[in-house]
Image (cartoon, rainbow, N blue to C red):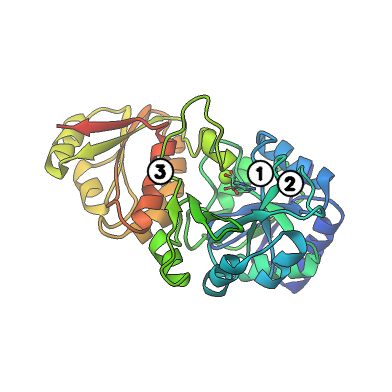
Amino acid sequence: METLIIENPNESDIKEASRIIRSGGLVVFPTETVYGLGASALDPEAAKKIYAAKGRPSDNPLIIHLSRAEEAEKYCYTNEKFYKLAECFMPGPLTVILPKRDIIPMEVTGGLSTVAVRVPMNEIALELIKSSEVPIAAPSANISGRPSPTCPIHVINDLGGKVDAILCGGECEVGLESTIVRCEADGTVSQLRPGAITPEMLSAAMGGAEVIDLSTRKLDDDEKPIAPGMKYRHYAPKAKVTVLVGDREKIFKYMEELSSKEEIGFLTDFETAKKLGKNAFSYGKRDSAKEMAHNLFKNLREFDEHEEIKQVYADMPKLQGLGLAVYNRLIKAAGFDVREIK
Ligand code: AMP
Ligand code: MG
């Protein structure tokens, strides 16, 4: 199919895109986290098109995007904790899972009786949702298994010719997907995926209430995931990725010894990358998890442009705050291949 690519969409472009959504088509739009591949969340046939375009397994549910938190009541059964979180983080990079109402088709939730809701902060996204007059179901706008797209070119490379329109709105500010939490009717709140809204921030918004972290464990092969996306291989460039942990000096030595090899690449902080030379990509200043989050997916995709690189060694961020979300994506890109350097 021919894909309409719209740079810096204006009001009438967004109106046109909303007509596509209402008529059951696919529109990619920017958000503050990553680009989303959107369709009407009330239309099971449109949801199926999302899965087909991405090559996504049909049991991996979609997030529905609303223009206001107050709308959530129409699509799911909300509770007190939801509104506390919504007050602080909606619009923003937070997704909340709640029991769904019948109006949301099972095709959107991968057969689950719950639905994930989010209110994005990006103006284009909000205008598109408002103007469509339906909630928009959208996973990240990448081919399944690839790094999530944070720039228009990533989307064009993955989905050009497979969607009706792409609204280009520059680089995504956060660069990692939303934090996902589950809010139970009994008041229990658990984190299923780390993101820019950290457990500390969530807990503070709920007057110090506990947030159970279910996101850091690797699942056993036969274990049923709570967030189905957790079981799939993710974010992977074509090269193999290994995450190095341990003493910084030793890691640097290890990398330096390998740096003359054509087939080896590095993902590390700015200063270290400069020292290592040509196959070393920097994802930001060492103490800035924000920069690392912003650049991680872009960097992972850059390795694909260097076919000679078969193995990437990645340095890890500091394991606190947003650094934990960066680490979560990095170890998935590595297929959990983490090597301790002694
Ligand atoms: P993506 O937008 O590509 O990051 O994918 C959305 C992710 O949200 C899925 O992979 C799931 O892990 C999670 N998710 C969406 N809906 C639900 C739900 N009802 N229950 C648990 N996890 C969900
Ligand atoms: Mg995704």
Circle 3: element type: loop
Q: Position of residue 213 (x, y in %)?
A: 43, 50
Mark 3, residue position = 216
* Apparent side of residue 230 relative to residue 340 in the rendered image (left or right): right
Residue ranking furthest to the front? 186
The residue at which mark 1 appears reads as 61
Q: Position of residue 136 (x, y in %)?
A: 73, 57
Kindly state the secondary structure of the residue where label 2 is placed: loop
**Residues at marks 1 and 2 touching, judged by CB atoms closer than 8 Å:** yes
The dot on residue 108 is 2
Toward the right, the furthest residue is: 23
**Which image quadrant shows ligand 2?**
top right
Mark 3: which amino acid? Answer: Thr
Residue 77 location, x and y as percent?
70, 60
Label 2 beta carbon less than 8 Å to ligand 1 = no
* Cα–Cα gap, marks 3 and 1: 20 Å
Of the residues under marks 1 and 2, which one precedes in the sequence? Answer: 1
Q: Residues within 10 Å of mark 2 (few under 14, many from 20)?
A: many
Q: Is mark 3 within 8 Å of ligand 1?
A: no
Q: Is residue 103 left or right of residue 228?
A: right
At 77% across and 45% down in the image, what residue appears? Answer: 47
Disc with the residue nearer the chain's start (3 vs 2): 2
Callout 1, which amino acid? Pro
Which-is-in-front pick, marks 3 and 2?
3
Q: Is residue 180 left or right of residue 292?
A: right
Closer to the camera, 225 or 150? 225
